[in-house]
């Protein structure tokens, strides 16, 4: 008998529990450790923040699902992992021992690294459903007395898509409310250029997103380092290509949403051999930690080096498709090890993404995610918005049913295949800089 523990019940952890359950022998036991009873579909948080969804629309009570799948589900969260002892210490003081551990914690949101950043400061967030609910409450107050808006992602951020999504969704909603003409909007980002996305662009994301910003009268500042935020002012240093300050900006705002940098969670941060200095889990090509080979990892918590140097630090995103690939490789490797075989499965690390813009959107495919690529494609249109709505419903239904099929791969690729009937997907569609 082997004890397998999955630490973290977000996207990667829930998928990992489902897929690993299918790989177990009858005598093995699987435990999932999360914080709270519910799974939330993070890609829908921008819709919650603008009032297009309620929190209850995008959450799933995992207790019943895990019971049906014979997965022990602990909801108190972890205080500390003790890899040398092969145990996870829970917040309540008890410990869970393991033969194999899969770390899928996601990130800790580093709001404290910039004064005034985050829901406890002066800006909103769409990183967690609770933040999105708070952002919606603030948005409703804003609409009663509109003014300037700042949206974007600070230095060290690695997830830029939701910032673009929220800016465009916000623009759409403001136009619906007939107050867009009273709102100056500015997009502030650590990216070296618009549409970089932490990936050095995909297809023509640079041109398409710049065009979208211009058409919607949204100004932008790239190579931006946010130095501090007060109740009404965001202080920003705009750097040149050599990393020197080109100019400074004091941007007034009445509403702001800025994505933070990520770091590893406290339960694993600082564990020598397990994580890097930022607290992300070190993993080999089989999602396995070199120092503690009984520890696997998948999702945003995995350490991935940046694409290359940029004037302002920019991280690499882990898209849903990429996370699912890590999870599948991990599950298959665990299944092999439980049967005395070597771990040989590898994640594909491809990126397929649907970015909703409220009344349109951008889709992109990067194979592999990190350049150089075999496929480097992007397209935009109203079909992307409809595809993302459909995908949300599909994915939540699968989570509720506890099915372990490759959700992202099937749904997203089927949507893209439909679009390809109108616009063929070439093997290469231009350079990474768009």
Image: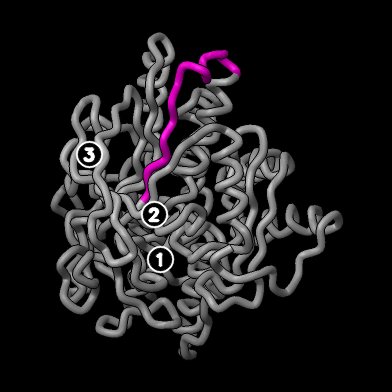
Answer with mark 2 or mark 3, whichever residue precedes in sequence.
2
Answer with mark 2 or mark 1, whichever residue precedes in sequence.
1
Q: Which residue is mark 1?
A: 29
Task: Work out whether 218 lies above or below 395.
Answer: above
Does 274 appear in magenta? Answer: no
| First to last magenta residue range | 176-189
The circle on residue 72 is 2
Question: Residue placed at 50% from the left, 73% from the top?
Answer: 370
Quadrant in which the N terminus appears: bottom left
The circle on residue 263 is none
Answer with mark 3 or mark 1, whichever residue precedes in sequence.
1
How dense is the environment of label 3, judged by Cα within 10 Å: few (below 14), some, or many (20 and up)?
A: some
> Helix, strand, or loop for circle 1?
strand
- The colour scheme applied to this rendered structure is one colour
Can you give x and y, in whole percent of width and height, for residue 63 in the image? 43, 43
Question: Residue placed at 44% from the left, 51% from the top?
Answer: 160
């Amino acid at each position: 008998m082997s004890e397998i523990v999955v630490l973290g019940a977000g996207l990667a952890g829930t998928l990992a529990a489902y897929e690993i359950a299918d790989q177990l022998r009858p005598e093995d036991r699987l435990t999932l450790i999360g914080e709270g009873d519910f799974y939330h579909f993070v890609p829908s948080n921008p819709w919650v923040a603008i009032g297009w969804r309620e929190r209850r629309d995008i959450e799933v009570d995992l207790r019943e699902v895990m019971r049906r799948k014979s997965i022990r589900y602990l909801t108190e969260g972890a205080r500390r992992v003790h890899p040398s002892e092969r145990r996870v210490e829970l917040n309540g003081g008890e410990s869970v021992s393991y033969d194999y551990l899969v770390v899928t914690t996601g990130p800790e949101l580093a709001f404290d690294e910039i004064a005034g950043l985050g829901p406890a400061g002066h800006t909103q967030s769409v990183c967690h459903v609770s933040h999105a609910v708070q952002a919606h409450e603030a948005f409703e107050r804003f609409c009663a007395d509109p003014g300037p808006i700042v949206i974007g992602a600070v230095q060290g951020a690695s997830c830029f898509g939701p910032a673009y999504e929220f800016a465009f969704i916000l623009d759409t909603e403001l136009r619906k409310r007939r107050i867009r003409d009273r709102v100056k909007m500015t997009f502030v980002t650590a990216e070296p250029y618009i549409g970089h996305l932490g990936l050095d662009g995909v297809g023509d994301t640079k041109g398409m997103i710049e065009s979208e910003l211009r058409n919607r009268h949204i100004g932008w500042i790239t190579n931006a380092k946010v130095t501090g935020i007060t109740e009404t002012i965001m202080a920003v240093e705009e750097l040149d290509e050599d990393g020197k300050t080109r100019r400074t900006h004091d941007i007034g705002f009445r509403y702001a949403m800025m994505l933070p940098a990520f770091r590893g969670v406290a339960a694993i941060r600082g564990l020598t051999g397990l994580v890097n200095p930022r607290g992300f889990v070190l993993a080999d090509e089989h999602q396995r930690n070199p120092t503690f080979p009984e520890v696997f990892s998948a999702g945003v918590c995995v350490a991935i080096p940046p694409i290359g140097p940029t004037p302002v630090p920019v991280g690499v995103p882990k898209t849903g498709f990429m996370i699912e690939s890590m999870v599948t490789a991990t599950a298959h490797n665990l299944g092999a090890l439980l049967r005395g075989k070597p771990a040989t499965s590898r994640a594909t690390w491809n990126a397929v993404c649907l970015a909703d813009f409220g009344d349109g959107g951008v889709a992109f495919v990067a194979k592999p995610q990190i350049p150089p690529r075999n496929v480097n494609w992007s397209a935009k249109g109203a079909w992307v918005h409809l595809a993302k709505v459909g995908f949300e419903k599909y994915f939540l239904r699968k989570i509720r049913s506890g099915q372990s099929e490759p959700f992202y791969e099937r749904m997203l690729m089927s949507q893209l295949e439909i679009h390809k009937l109108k616009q063929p997907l070439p093997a290469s569609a231009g350079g990474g800089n768009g």
